[in-house]
Image (tube, coloured by chain):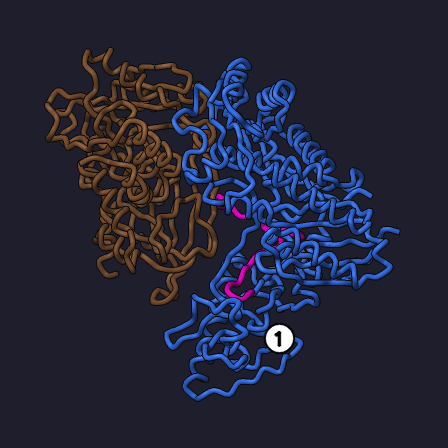
């Protein structure tokens, strides 16, 4: 199968749902993807099983400040420079592009990068959702060494980093990003197909497409989305309070949803840090990271990003299980509630909501 | 003496005109059907108020016009100029070229050609690239354009590349130029879209100002003309000729300001009930609250600051059925179809009348319906009241003390009190609130930029305030009376140096 222009709206909707409130606005990425497919043709979607063991997979993502990426849009030449650097280092060209993060903008725009490079897109990603920090990827959890980062900026600069560990990888990549004007394209963990097996989350592009299509032209979009995700409906109600502050480069805050209809009398509080991380009712968590929590418009089932939350919106909060990889000890250590500063022991969403 | 003001507002259905005296009282008003060419309806409404003024028409000092010329031109792809679209952003931004996502027919009607050339700035003010003036010349030599739209990366913070290239275009090609930093805020694609639309509307702007000036001259009026813009303020014709896109959305802004003025409330929720829908807006400190979401005009996304309007499907003509309310309406056929007019379709008007709610000038509508229909109508009133209460709650953001100002031809369907809001005010002349809003408007200017958050911050904010005030004066405000009416600071994340995004708006009464 391949991804064509007509698939982009569904992919964008699905990626927004998997973004759990973060991952960036899918709009610019959609425009870039449509443009690239029109120019270079549809993008084949391949499975890991289709690739020979030594085939190189390049996980790509845009990093930087959202305000900057909406103003200083990326250059069309950036993916090619990263691909050339991969070939220079490994002695052979990459065979596929992979999204590092399927949630939000970084789930959609790799379609554009793959089209520009004339490469297929791997039906997989490194998160199965969106996360704010560089080390919060499946490759890290799987124990692959964080020993290579390739970055390209709008000017054509290419920086290759050989960090000693994930901490230095993050520190150096961020410094390069700031020098490059707070926006860059990054390949982190260049993988062989053999090395990628078990270290990436497979099937997530197809999944995002299906999630996006589930709400297309159906009488009950919310029910259709909930069914497709196998999600628990934490509450349906009205947003009554949104509090946000920017600290340490991240947007933190809380959002309060008061139940309406059958949920009248209930109050759900969401803890936000770029993404929706914990849902609490009466002091008791109903869902927590790394499980997925997304706020959707009750009527249309369209996902609402954390920065789009406004008083008075009629919303439903959905939560569903993350990929099993995140529930391993290393996964929880990397992206469990304590990794975000919450003094909570992880309990799977299906246990927390068994009574709902 | 030239102490009278005329306000004219062109709406989708009617063109309204009012005359205000020096004390701000409405001394004449008129409603005429909006004509397809807009201008005829405008003349008719103007003539109607002039006729009722008699001799005192000599005292008209100013005429303010809010019009849909620009909106219609874009929606109908009519009278649009061919624009050379020039982006200063290479080597960045090539991933999404100009006009991506535009409807094909609009793009065809507007674009004379597009180019992404070197220029623009980084977020911290460094140059992305020097603008290549020869590349600009080569591009412009190839295209046949009536105007040029220039958009530079981070120009709201650093506008000098846009100005440099703009001067070249004016000096060497003699073409009118739209510079994006004068039009929109951060967000390259949305600002670029608004800038291109602005450049495409120069011809329409000339038509509107020409028609207004001619209409005044033919009637021997020496009044100074102004155009209303989307934030509820005015522009001189010279200013409007450069910023025609700012006239889009002036109708709702005028309606909000007029309603507040007539009711005497500076902070209020305005509920405008029409035939098919009800529009709600919020007035904060005398100005319309602006929408945080991106605004689509003719299928094109812009980051224009428009009034935050919530529209719900409830109007005097909304059809009432056993299973519920609307969302369809009998629209202009209400005078034949509604039960109170002897028709056969139960409407919201019938439901309101059955509940004892009638227009203030009680037209003597009576209703005699079977029990089953009466029950259905009662249900419709309950449903409508819930719909309104729900919409009011969304707009008040939980502040329940603000008064509700009811305007529009269908305002009588509203209950005497709406839960979640203060008192319900039904001001006199509410049916021409939009024209009143145009007549009382101030002139304004705004600045949206990125400033360092460190020690130099306060000085930089002072400079931004001065710039906003200067822009208000350029739009026609009295320099001695300009005030800063809005100052918003938002901290930015993921940057090398702490920085804030600053939005400043200045406004003041028109200069004498």
Magenta region includes residue B291: yes
Please give the residue where the numbered disc 1 appears in the rendered image.
B359
Residue B207 in the image, given as x and y percentages of width and height:
65, 42
Q: Is mark 1 on a helix, strand or loop?
A: loop
- Host chain of mark 1: B
Label 1 crowd (10 A; few <14 / some 14-19 / many >=20):
some
Tell me which corner region of the image, top left, top right, bottom left or bottom right, holds residue B165: top right
Residue at x-position 38% and y-position 37%: A24
Residue B373 in the image, given as x and y percentages of width and height:
43, 83
Q: Specify the colour of chain B.
A: blue
Indicate the chain coloured brown by its letter. Answer: A
Magenta region includes residue A4: no
Would residue B134 appear left or right of B238 to someone viewing this image?
left
Q: Which of B94 and B221 is in front in this view?
A: B221
Residue B108 in the image, given as x and y percentages of width and height:
45, 35
Residue B152 in the image, given as x and y percentages of width and height:
53, 25
Look at the image and tell me in which quarter the C terminus of chain B lies: top right
Would residue B176 appear left or right of A144 to someone viewing this image?
right
Would residue A307 appear left or right of A111 to someone viewing this image?
right
Q: Which of B356 and B166 is in front in this view?
A: B166
């Amino acid at each position: 199968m391949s991804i064509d222009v007509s698939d982009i709206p569904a992919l964008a909707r699905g990626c927004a749902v998997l973004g759990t409130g973060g991952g960036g606005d899918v709009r610019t990425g959609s425009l870039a993807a449509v443009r690239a497919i029109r120019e270079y043709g549809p993008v084949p979607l391949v499975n890991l099983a289709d690739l020979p063991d030594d085939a190189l997979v390049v996980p790509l993502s845009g990093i930087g400040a959202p305000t900057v990426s909406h103003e200083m849009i990326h250059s069309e030449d950036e993916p090619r420079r990263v691909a050339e650097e991969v070939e220079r280092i490994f002695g052979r060209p990459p065979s596929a592009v992979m999204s590092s993060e399927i949630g939000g903008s970084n789930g959609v725009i790799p379609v554009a990068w793959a089209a520009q490079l004339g490469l297929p897109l791997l039906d997989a990603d490194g998160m199965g959702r969106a996360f704010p920090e560089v080390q919060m990827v499946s490759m890290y959890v799987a124990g692959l060494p964080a020993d290579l980062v390739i970055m390209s900026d709008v000017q054509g600069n290419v920086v290759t980093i050989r960090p000693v560990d994930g901490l230095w990888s993050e520190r150096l990549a961020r410094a390069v990003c700031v020098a490059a004007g707070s926006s860059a394209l990054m390949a982190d963990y260049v993988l062989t197909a053999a090395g990628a097996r078990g270290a990436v989350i497979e099937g997530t592009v197809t999944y995002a497409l299906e999630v996006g299509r589930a709400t297309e032209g159906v009488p009950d979009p919310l029910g259709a989305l909930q069914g497709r995700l196998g999600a628990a409906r934490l509450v349906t109600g009205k947003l009554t309070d949104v509090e946000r502050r920017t600290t340490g480069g991240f947007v933190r805050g809380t959002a309060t949803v008061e139940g309406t209809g059958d949920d009248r009398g209930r109050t759900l509080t969401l803890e936000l840090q770029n993404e929706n991380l914990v849902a609490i009712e009466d002091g008791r968590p109903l869902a927590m990271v790394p499980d997925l929590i997304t706020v959707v418009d009750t009527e249309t089932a369209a996902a609402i990003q954390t920065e789009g939350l406004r008083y008075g919106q009629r919303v439903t909060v959905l939560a569903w299980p993350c990929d099993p990889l995140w529930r391993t000890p290393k996964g929880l250590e990397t992206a469990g509630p304590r990794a975000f500063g919450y003094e909570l022991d992880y309990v799977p969403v299906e246990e927390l909501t068994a009574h709902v | 003496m030239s102490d009278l003001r005329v306000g004219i507002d062109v709406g989708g259905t009617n063109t309204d005109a009012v005359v205000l005296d020096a004390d701000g009282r409405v001394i004449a008003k008129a409603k005429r059907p909006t004509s397809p060419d807009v201008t005829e309806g405008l003349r008719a409404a103007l003539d109607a108020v002039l006729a009722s003024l008699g001799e005192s028409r000599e005292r008209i000092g100013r005429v303010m016009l809010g019009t849909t010329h620009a909106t219609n031109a874009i929606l109908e792809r009519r009278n649009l100029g061919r624009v050379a679209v020039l982006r200063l952003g290479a080597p960045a931004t090539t991933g999404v070229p100009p006009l991506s996502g535009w409807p094909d027919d609009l793009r065809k009607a507007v674009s004379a050609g597009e180019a992404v050339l070197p220029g623009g700035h980084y977020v911290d003010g460094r140059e992305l690239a020097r603008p290549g003036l020869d590349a600009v010349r080569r591009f412009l030599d190839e295209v046949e354009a009536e105007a040029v739209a220039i958009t530079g990366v981070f120009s709201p913070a650093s506008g000098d590349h846009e100005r440099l290239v703009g001067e070249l275009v004016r000096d060497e090609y003699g073409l009118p130029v739209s510079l994006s930093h004068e039009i929109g805020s951060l967000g390259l694609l949305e600002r670029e879209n608004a800038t291109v639309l602005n450049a495409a509307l120069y011809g329409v702007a000339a038509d509107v100002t020409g028609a207004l000036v001619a209409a005044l001259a033919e009637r021997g009026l020496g009044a100074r003309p102004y155009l209303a813009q989307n934030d509820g303020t005015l522009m001189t014709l010279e200013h409007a000729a450069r910023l025609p896109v700012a006239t889009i959305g002036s109708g709702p802004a005028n309606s909000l300001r007029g309603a507040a003025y007539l009711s005497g409330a500076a902070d209020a929720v305005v509920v405008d009930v029409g035939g098919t829908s009800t529009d709600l807006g919020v007035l904060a400190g005398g100005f319309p609250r602006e929408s945080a979401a991106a605004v689509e005009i003719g299928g094109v996304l812009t980051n224009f600051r428009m009034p935050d309007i919530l529209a719900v499907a409830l109007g005097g003509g909304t059809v009432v059925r056993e299973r519920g309310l609307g969302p369809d309406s009998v629209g202009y056929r209400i005078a034949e179809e509604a039960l109170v007019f002897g028709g056969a379709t139960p409407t919201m008007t019938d439901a309101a009348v059955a509940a004892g709610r009638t227009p203030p000038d009680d037209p003597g509508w009576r209703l005699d319906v079977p029990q089953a229909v009466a029950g259905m109508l009662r249900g419709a009133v309950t449903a409508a009241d819930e719909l309104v209460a729900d919409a009011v709650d969304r707009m008040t953001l939980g502040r329940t003390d603000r008064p509700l100002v009811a305007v529009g031809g269908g305002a009588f369907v509203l209950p005497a009190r709406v839960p979640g809001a203060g008192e319900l005010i039904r001001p006199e002349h509410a049916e021409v609130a939009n024209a009143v809003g145009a007549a009382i408007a101030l002139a304004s200017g705004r600045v949206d930029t990125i400033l360092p958050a460190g020690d130099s911050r306060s000085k930089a904010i002072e400079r931004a305030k001065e710039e906003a005030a200067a822009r208000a004066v350029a739009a026609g405000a009295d320099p001695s009376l300009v005030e800063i009416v809005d100052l918003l600071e938002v901290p930015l994340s993921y940057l090398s140096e702490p920085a804030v995004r600053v939005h400043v708006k200045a406004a003041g009464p028109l200069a004498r």
